[in-house]
Amino acid sequence: MTQFYARLVVVVGSILVAGPGLAASVVNTGSAAVVLVVVEDGTRTELSLDAGGSDTICSSGCFLTLPNGDRIGLAGGETVEIKDGIATIK
């Protein structure tokens, strides 16, 4: 759990340094639709992605909650691939 908090600090620090202008991409490479929760600037939005679907999110950094409850901090510029509920950040 300590490693999780260390990563969270790095991500939050990256968000503060990155500033506006960068956006993250999310791609559903799985075979079923997924619903993600995006919290950006205190605003919570549900994002539904069909199998093979993609979208651009987090223009000013955000937190992304996956269907399994995992929460990921994004600074922008990342590509998040989701397959069968598991996320890979590139």
Image (tube, rainbow, N blue to C red):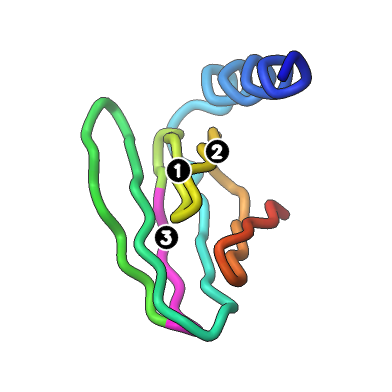
What's the residue at 63%, 21% (across, down)? 8
Which of the two discs, 1 and 3, labels the residue nearer the N terminus? Answer: 3
| Disc 2 secondary structure class | strand
Relative side of 24 to 89, left or right: left
Query: Which label sits on residue 64?
Result: 1
CA neighbours of label 3 inside 10 A, class few (<14), some (14 to 19), many (20+): few
Q: Are marks 2 and 3 in contact (CB under 8 Å)?
A: no
Front residue of 7/86: it is 86
Q: CA distance from mark 1 to mark 2?
A: 5 Å
Which of the two discs, 2 and 3, labels the residue nearer the N terminus? Answer: 3
CA neighbours of label 2 inside 10 A, class few (<14), some (14 to 19), many (20+): some
Which of the two discs, 1 and 2, labels the residue nearer the N terminus? Answer: 1
CA neighbours of label 1 inside 10 A, class few (<14), some (14 to 19), many (20+): many
Q: Which residue is mark 3?
A: 56
Which residue type does callout 1 highlight? Leu
Query: Which label sits on residue 75?
Result: none
Vertical position of residue 52 compared to residue 11: above or below: below
| Disc 3 secondary structure class | strand
Q: Which residue is mark 2?
A: 72
Front residue of 60/46: it is 46
Question: Does the magenta run of residues contain 89?
Answer: no
Vertical position of residue 22 compared to residue 6: above or below: below
Which residue type does callout 2 highlight? Ile
- Point out the stretch of residues depicted in magenta: 51-57
Q: Which of label 1 and label 3 is nearer to you?
A: 1
| Disc 1 secondary structure class | strand
Vertical position of residue 71 compared to residue 29: above or below: above
Please state the horizontal and vertical placement of residue 43, each as a whole percent of the image: 21, 34
Q: In the rendered image, which quarter contains the N terminus?
A: top right
Q: Which of label 2 and label 3 is nearer to you?
A: 2
Please state the horizontal and vertical placement of residue 63, each as a whole percent of the image: 44, 35
